[in-house]
């Protein structure tokens, strides 16, 4: 399984009755599989996974596996607050065809979520999972931090293949890379600092921006790996305004709005999330206007 390059964290479409819309999901994936993206992630934070129950989650994985050809990695979110539930989610994802699972840090009982607790949690999930496990650290959402020392310990597990680090702390990404084996893939989750993450050794990224401008994100990866740093830095600067709109400014609603603007129908967010305000649509249109591939997607 190729664990380098750019992966897209796919949003979950819902219909007018607020039900998971698998037809829309398959149609969107049919577009994305024609791009140079390495692979796809469903049921991550951009997939609104915490707003889905287990049956809905299983529907998403099954539909995505139908749309994603074998050989293109499909990673499914299996994060749960309890170790028991995370193990169950990982097993179901594997049965439904996921190539690997992405397991976010539990965060509800924050004071008890120590490095020792995380090592026990992830070890139990990796022991039981039929497919490789990716650690998932997103401190801005969970309020907890999976520290490099714990990751270094977990990276020795034969069924833990890598990690998504969604913080923009490049120093922490550098520590994660230096403290883990060469075959452990550290994937950046922030498009705003993607170039810097690659420069300190990240193997690639799982980027919401990759859903909207996959060619540009892949190009940034390729330029950096080829040592063409002047061009890579210029492209990173071009990506930052749109990345911020899809990240800290508007999050999942911003991602869905941007995709709808470029003709990729992924519906609206599930409550309690709401659609972005009109001012956000204006900002998104302006930011999208700088990318030639957006115009081409709109003609598809």
Image (cartoon, rainbow, N blue to C red):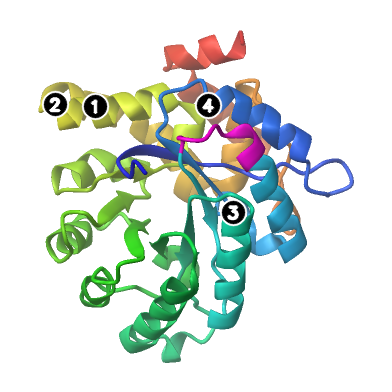
Q: Residues within 10 Å of mark 2 (few under 14, many from 20)?
A: few
Q: Residue at x 41, y 76 (%)?
A: 122
Tag 4's secondary structure? loop
Badge 3 is on which residue?
A: 43
Tag 3's secondary structure? loop
Q: Residue at x 63, y 33 (%)?
A: 67
4 above or below 102? above
Name the quarter where the C terminus is drawn. top right
Q: Which one is in front, 300 or 279?
A: 300
Q: Of the numbered discs in the image, which one, if any, rests on residue 193?
A: none
> What residue span does the magenta drawing correspond to?
65-72
Q: Residues within 10 Å of mark 4 (few under 14, many from 20)?
A: some
Badge 2 is on which residue?
A: 226
Left or right relative to 15: residue 169: left
The Cα atoms of the two marked residues, 1 and 3, are separated by 27 Å
Badge 1 is on which residue?
A: 222
Dominant SS type (magenta): loop
């Amino acid at each position: 399984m190729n664990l380098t390059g750019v992966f897209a964290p796919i949003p979950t479409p819902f219909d007018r009755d607020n039900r998971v819309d698998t037809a829309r999901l398959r149609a969107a994936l049919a577009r994305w599989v024609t791009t140079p993206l390495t692979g796809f992630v469903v049921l991550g934070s951009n997939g609104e996974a915490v707003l889905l129950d287990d049956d809905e989650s299983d529907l998403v994985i099954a539909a995505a596996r139908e749309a994603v050809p074998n050989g293109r990695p499909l990673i499914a979110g299996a994060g749960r607050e309890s170790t028991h539930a995370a193990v169950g989610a990982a097993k179901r994802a594997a049965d439904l065809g996921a190539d690997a699972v992405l397991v976010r840090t539990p965060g509800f009982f924050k004071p008890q979520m120590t490095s020792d607790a995380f090592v026990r949690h992830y070890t139990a999930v990796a022991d039981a999972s039929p497919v490789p496990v990716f650690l998932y650290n997103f401190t801005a959402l969970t309020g907890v931090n999976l520290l490099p020392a714990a990751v270094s310990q977990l990276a020795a597990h034969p069924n833990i293949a890598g990690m998504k680090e969604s913080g923009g702390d490049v120093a922490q990404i550098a520590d994660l890379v230096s403290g883990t084996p060469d075959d452990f893939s550290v994937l950046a989750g922030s498009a705003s600092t993607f170039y810097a993450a690659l420069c300190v050794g990240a193997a690639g990224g799982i980027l919401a921006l990759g859903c909207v401008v996959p060619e540009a994100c892949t190009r940034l990866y390729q330029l950096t790996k080829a040592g063409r740093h002047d061009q890579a830095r210029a492209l990173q600067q071009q990506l930052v305004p749109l990345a911020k709109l899809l990240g800290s400014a508007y999050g999942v609603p911003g991602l869905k709005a941007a995709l709808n603007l470029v003709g990729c129908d992924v519906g609206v967010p599930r409550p309690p999330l709401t659609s972005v305000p009109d001012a956000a649509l204006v900002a998104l249109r302006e930011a999208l206007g700088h990318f030639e591939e957006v115009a081409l997607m709109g003609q598809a």
